[in-house]
Amino acid sequence: MEQTKALNALEQITSLQPFLALSKSATSPRAAADLVTRATSAPNTFLFTELLQTPQIQALAASAEFTSYLTLLQIFSYGTYGTYNATPDLPTLNDTQTLKLRQLSLLSLVSDRSNLSYDALQKALGLSSAREVEDLVITAIYAGLLHATLDPARQAIQISSVAPLRDLAPGTIPDMIRALQNWAGRCQSTLGDLEEQIKSIRDAATAREKEKQTSDIKLHTLMESVSDMERIPFSRDNLTRRAINKRSMAENLGPAALAESMDLDDAFAADDPAKRASKRKL
């Protein structure tokens, strides 16, 4: 597909070359006007900027009789079928010119949209039926002007891609620059928001990791304390101190561990005869 697009683009560029060569000999307004008619009627010629800029064609502006041909070529370069109908005193289009101007107008209409309704195209291109809309789109597809899918059920056209074959109207470049600058500004703002979100996520992850490390250190310290106490020789005093130490550890670990430590103290008391005697007296 990419190779086909490249070949079509090359064909569009080279198709105007014969008319550029003929423009050098079109020294009279009539000859220049005839050259405009021939170029706009050529089936595979869709780019006209170079021909429009030649001195011989620009000279038509000074001819009251043929200046309309200069306007006609301008419309084929960057205008639409609607522009032609709205401009008075233009030369009558033949069938080939009419088809080409509608094809070029179609490119302008779909260049900034992904789909268009049959009704919108029918009105914009001066077509009388949905069938004529479909026929026009099919001819544009076969000419390599666009890739699209017809959807008769929904009366719409789904646009996949459009060939960049429309010339730029005078004064449109500043507008394009402003549009691109606005788009670049929105992209920069979006990137800034994304960077802030990424930073927030990283900071939260770092905080969680530090909290986990602190918890691991506390747990490791407590486990080492328990291990040290288990190595102390078995005696009542040691058991008493051990119970106290465990109670302190339990207080650090929480209410459940404290209750368990108290149970341990009661167990020690049960083994002490003096304490058992004291309990009997009570």
Image (spheres, rainbow, N blue to C red):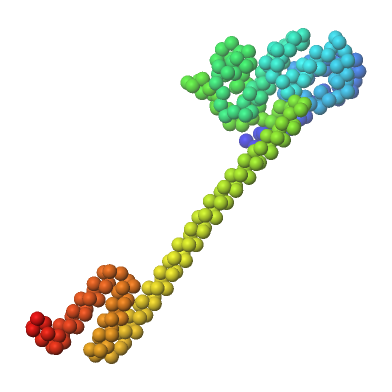
The structure residue drawn at horizontal position 62% and vertical position 35%, both measured from the top left corner, is 1
- Outermost residue toward the front in this view: 282
Q: Is the residue 96 above or below the residue 202 in the image?
A: above
Asked whether the viewer can see residue 15, the reply is: no
The quadrant in which residue 161 appears is top right
Q: Is residue 93 left or right of residue 121?
A: right
> Foreground: 243 or 226?
243
> Foreground: 172 or 2?
172
Q: Is the residue 264 above or below the residue 148 in the image?
A: below
Q: Is residue 146 left or right of residue 9?
A: left
> Foreground: 210 or 118?
210
Horizontal and vertical percent position of residue 15: 77, 26
The structure residue drawn at horizontal position 8% and vertical position 84%, both measured from the top left corner, is 281
Horizontal and vertical percent position of residue 215: 40, 69
The quadrant in which residue 112 appears is top right
Query: How many numbered badges does the structure rendering display?
Result: 0
Q: Is residue 111 left or right of residue 118?
A: right
The quadrant in which residue 171 appears is top right
Asked whether the viewer can see residue 46, the reply is: yes
On-image quarter of the C terminus: bottom left
Q: Is residue 34 left or right of residue 275?
A: right
